[in-house]
């Protein structure tokens, strides 16, 4: 049976069970353990039959067994769970980059549903959902006490239908409702653009299309710039990227490394450990890289950020990442269902585990909340100059070409200033690359 290896809110894993023969006291101990297990299974059977025969309403045996399996898995950690045939099919579709829903990745923390990140360009993103939000109610019904799968099930619904979710957000005094219209979620894995002399690669997820999209996007931007010599560096924007396929995270990291370890996974037994190493070839030709992360950057995103940081190939900027350093194997089961089981942890090249700690940026940069419109209008009024006054004298010391160059430089500076208002963290990353380019040019 095929296993799906994932690293994100879903993860990856490698695992082999080996049976060995033992004798003497160990065998006796094993016999006692098996006896205790069978006694517990008998207890489970007794309870199952009591529920089937005496519960106040008739209950489906299939539903009872699936609930018991899911309860067994979810008791282990927040990322292990049972996937029904429908859920397993939806997960396969999601890794291909298109699915129906709200466009948020969620996890469970102390019984509450927590938003890991909204996905770019989705209904949840448009509605203003933020990483770190807690969802307490769906259409007025409390989610407290439900499993994560049950809570997610309540959020699913027909495309075009409305859902009202109640949100608790840090910095807000009271919970508030958010209206979202469900839609088909089409993920664009990588969006590429150029800001000034910097190529910005916004990676929203790690699915089958991520690496091909990254290569195509980078090549197109470099070609439009007239060659890599006209590029001062690259920003890999991994903010609010919840993860995805492990092999894609490895390929993206490998794209900017000439050699060395990318990530290692360590399971319960040493034989389950794996190391993934980079192959020669750097798509950026050694140009400096800044990686942007925040609290919504999880798992596969942390693999990329941690590896490039450890190899000193990139400067990591932003705020501490989510901290999901565990890996899951999705194992197909009979009846077309699947089991998602945590089977190992992953480690960055320096040997550090990200689990619960996250990746700490080299430079911590908070994203300030957007100013209100009135304050922006006041600043525009304050920034008026002599040239704005009616009848102002012209400058007679410069040629027309020199004036045009000054205007072009000023426009570039104004665009940079506007970017600081729209996205301070990205503007900070671009400023770093501009500074590094200036130093390199002088040398």
Image (cartoon, rainbow, N blue to C red):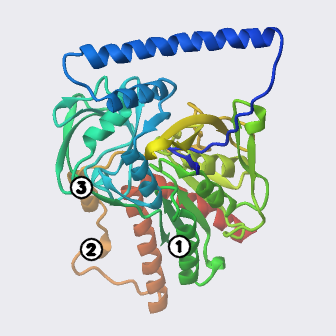
Number of numbered discs present? Answer: 3
Tag of residue 217:
1
Crowd tier of the residue under label 3, counting other residues whose Cα lies within 10 Å: few below 14, some 14–19, many 20 or above? few
* 269 lies above or below 118: above
On the image, the x and y values in percent for residue 352 come to 70, 36
Tag of residue 378:
3
Farthest residue, direction bottom: 400
On the image, the x and y values in percent for residue 360 come to 59, 39
* 405 lies above or below 43: below
On the image, the x and y values in percent for residue 121 come to 34, 59
Foreground tag (3 vs 1)? 1
Crowd tier of the residue under label 2, counting other residues whose Cα lies within 10 Å: few below 14, some 14–19, many 20 or above? few
Q: Residue at x 31, y 52 (%)?
A: 125
Left or right? Give the position of 137 relative to 118: left
What secondary structure is marked by label 3? helix
* 278 lies above or below 152: below
Q: Residue at x 69, y 30 (%)?
A: 268
User: What is the distance, in whole Å, between disc 1 and disc 2 at their CAs?
Assistant: 40 Å
Farthest residue, direction right: 24
The quarter of the picture where residue 345 lies is: top right
Q: Quadrant of the C terminus?
A: bottom right
Q: Residue at x 38, y 57 (%)?
A: 120
- Label whose residue precedes the other's in the sequence (2 or 3): 3
Residue in the foreground of this view, choosing between 236 and 198: 236
Is any atom of residue 311 visible in this view?
yes
- Label whose residue precedes the other's in the sequence (3 or 1): 1
Q: Disc 2 designates what residue?
A: 388
The quarter of the picture where residue 347 lies is: top right
User: What is the distance, in whole Å, between disc 2 and disc 3 at their CAs?
Assistant: 16 Å
Residue in the foreground of this view, choosing between 213 and 322: 213
């Amino acid at each position: 049976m095929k296993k799906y290896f994932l690293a994100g809110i879903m993860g990856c894993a490698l695992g082999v069970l080996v049976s060995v023969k033992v004798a003497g006291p160990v065998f006796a101990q094993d016999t006692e353990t098996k006896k205790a297990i069978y006694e517990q299974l008998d207890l489970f059977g007794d309870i199952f039959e009591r529920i089937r025969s005496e519960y106040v309403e008739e209950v489906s045996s299939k539903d009872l067994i699936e609930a018991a399996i899911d309860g067994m898995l979810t008791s282990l950690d927040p990322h292990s769970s049972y996937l029904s045939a429908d859920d397993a099919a939806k997960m396969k579709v999601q890794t291909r980059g298109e699915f129906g829903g709200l466009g948020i990745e969620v996890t469970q923390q102390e019984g509450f549903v927590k938003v890991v990140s909204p996905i770019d360009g989705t209904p949840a993103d448009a509605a203003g959902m933020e990483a770190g939000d807690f969802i307490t109610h769906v259409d007025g019904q409390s989610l407290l006490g439900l499993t994560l799968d049950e809570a997610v099930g309540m959020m699913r619904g027909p495309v075009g239908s409305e859902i009202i979710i109640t949100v608790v957000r840090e910095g807000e005094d009271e919970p508030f409702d958010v209206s979202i219209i469900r839609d088909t979620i089409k993920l664009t894995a990588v969006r590429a653009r150029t800001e000034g002399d910097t190529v910005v690669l916004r990676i929203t997820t790690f699915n089958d299309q991520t690496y091909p999209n990254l290569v195509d996007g980078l090549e197109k931007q470099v070609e439009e710039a007239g060659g890599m010599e006209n590029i001062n560096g690259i920003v890999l924007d991994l903010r609010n990227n919840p993860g995805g396929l492990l092999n894609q995270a490895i390929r993206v990291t490998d794209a900017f490394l000439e050699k060395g370890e990318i990530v290692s996974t360590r399971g319960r037994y040493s034989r389950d450990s794996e190391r993934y190493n980079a192959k020669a070839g750097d798509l950026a030709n050694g140009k400096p890289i800044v990686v942007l992360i925040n609290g919504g950057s999880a798992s596969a995103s942390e693999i990329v950020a941690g590896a490039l940081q450890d190899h000193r190939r990139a400067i990591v900027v932003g705020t501490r990442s989510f901290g999901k350093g565990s890996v899951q194997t999705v194992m197909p089961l009979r009846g077309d269902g699947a089991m998602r089981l945590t089977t190992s942890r992953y480690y960055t090249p320096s040997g550090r585990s990200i689990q619960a700690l996250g990746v700490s940026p080299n430079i911590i940069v908070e994203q300030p909340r957007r100013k209100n419109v009135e304050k922006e209008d006041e600043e525009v009024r304050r920034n008026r100059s002599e040239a704005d006054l009616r009848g102002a004298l012209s400058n007679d010391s410069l040629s027309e070409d020199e004036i045009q160059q000054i205007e072009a430089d000023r426009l570039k500076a104004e665009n940079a200033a506007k970017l600081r208002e729209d996205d301070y963290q990205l503007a900070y990353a671009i400023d770093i690359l501009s500074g590094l380019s200036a130093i390199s040019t002088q040398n």
